[in-house]
Every structure is written in structure tokens, then in C-alpha cells.
Amino acid sequence: MLANSRRDNSASEFNSPRKPTGNRMNRAEVARLRAAIVDFVETNKPVTVRQVFYAMTVQGLVDKSDKGPGDGYGNVQRQLQKLRESGVISWDDVVDHTRWIRRPLTWDSPSQAVRSLARGYRRDPWSGQTERVWIWCEKNALASIIEEITREFAVPFSVGVGFTSDSYAHKVVKEMVSDGGHVVQVYEFGDHDPSGVKAGKSAQRPS
């Protein structure tokens, strides 16, 4: 469904400490995990819980498992909760992009509405270009990081969340061709593992 897709297949190697054995963590392992979480959040805020989880698996501090409350994801989730409740990490530094608050925009007068619109005006930097760029991401956990860059350059950005649905893929393609006459170059970002590769290929299948 998504044509002209390019994939970032780069990988990094890390010298990481020993992974904890099983689901139970001793005090030293918990201390290392908490310190790493605080450092990661402070450096990359705002972040999602899953984003922190992936970072901790890369460092070898937790297992890459999210099957229950005693797994790697559960360990990260619990420590994040404790760190926020104790004030070590600010609640504003951990976000949840999967849930929304919808509140209509309102103004006190027509003139206030016009001034608000004028402040938000931004000229389209892609006007007159024969090609457009679209960013497709497999993971919602990376959305906040990638969106900072796509917003700066006025590039459309969509998150497939793994094996995306046909409905969502159709909606994205429909949006791509809505203004017509442009070649759309799609750049995909996702895990370079068997599941991530399959998810990327699935999104590219003919409609």
C-alpha cells in the first residue's frame, strides 16, 4: 500500500551490564535500573513508558518481555510510577500518546479568533515542489522524537503501530494523493528484527 518506501536498517552495539535473571530483581539491579531510567528521561524528555522500556532493554537492564506484571515492561512501568510519585521524575516528562483529551477551540470574540489564526499562519515550504516526503513509523513510542523533526520541516508523519490495519493504510494513501500530481517518497522507521521487517513489508503490499 505504501510505495517508494526506504528503511533505516542501521544497528548499534552496546556494552551493557548483565541482564537480570528471571522476573525478580535484586536491590542492586533495581538501583541500576532506576538510575538508568532517571538519566534516560532527563536526556530525552518527554518520553513514553514503552520508549523507556526499549531503552532499558538495549542497555541490558531488563528482559524484552511485556507478557505480564512481572516482566521487563512491568519492572520499568513500576519503577517509573514510583519515581514520579516520589517527585524524582516529573509527571510532565512521561507522556501517553495513545489516549486523547478532545476539547473544542473557543474564543471570546471574532477578532480574538482572527488574531489566533494569524499567529498560527505558516507558509507551506513544499509549495511548488514536484516531490513530497512522508515519514512512516512502526512504533508509537518513537512518535514524540520523530515528530519534533517532521513538524519543523512541515513533513507529514504517520504511525502504523506494528502491523497496521488496511483501513489506516488506505486513509494514509488517500491523504498522500489528496492534492495530486506529486511523487511521494515514503521513509519508514522501525525495528530491524523479523517482526519489524515483516511489518514494513506488510505496509508496502499492493492495495
Image (spheres, rainbow, N blue to C red):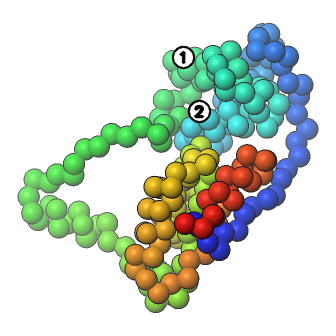
Counting residues from the start of the chain, the first of labels 2 and 1 encountered is 2
Which mark identifies residue 110? Answer: none
Percent of width and height locating residue 94: 53, 34
Can residue 147 be seen in the rendering of this structure? yes
Q: Which residue is mark 2?
A: 49
Location of residue 185 by image quarter:
bottom right
Disc 2 marks which amino acid?
A: Val
Disc number lying in front (2 or 1): 2
- Describe the element under mark 2 as helix, strand or loop: helix
In percent of the image, x 62 and y 35: which residue is there? Answer: 50
Q: Is residue 189 left or right of residue 174?
A: right
Location of residue 17 by image quarter:
top right
Percent of width and height locating residue 126: 48, 81
Q: Along the line of sight, which residue is nearer the eye, 62 or 121?
A: 62
In percent of the image, x 83 and y 19: which residue is there? Answer: 20
Percent of width and height locating residue 175: 43, 69
In percent of the image, x 89 and y 46: which residue is there? Answer: 13
Q: Along the line of sight, which residue is nearer the eye, 67 or 57?
A: 67
Q: Residues within 10 Å of mark 1 (few under 14, many from 20)?
A: few
Q: Which residue is mark 1?
A: 86
Q: Give the answer, above or below, for where 172 lies relative to 185.
A: above
Tags 2 and 1 touching, CB below 8 Å: no
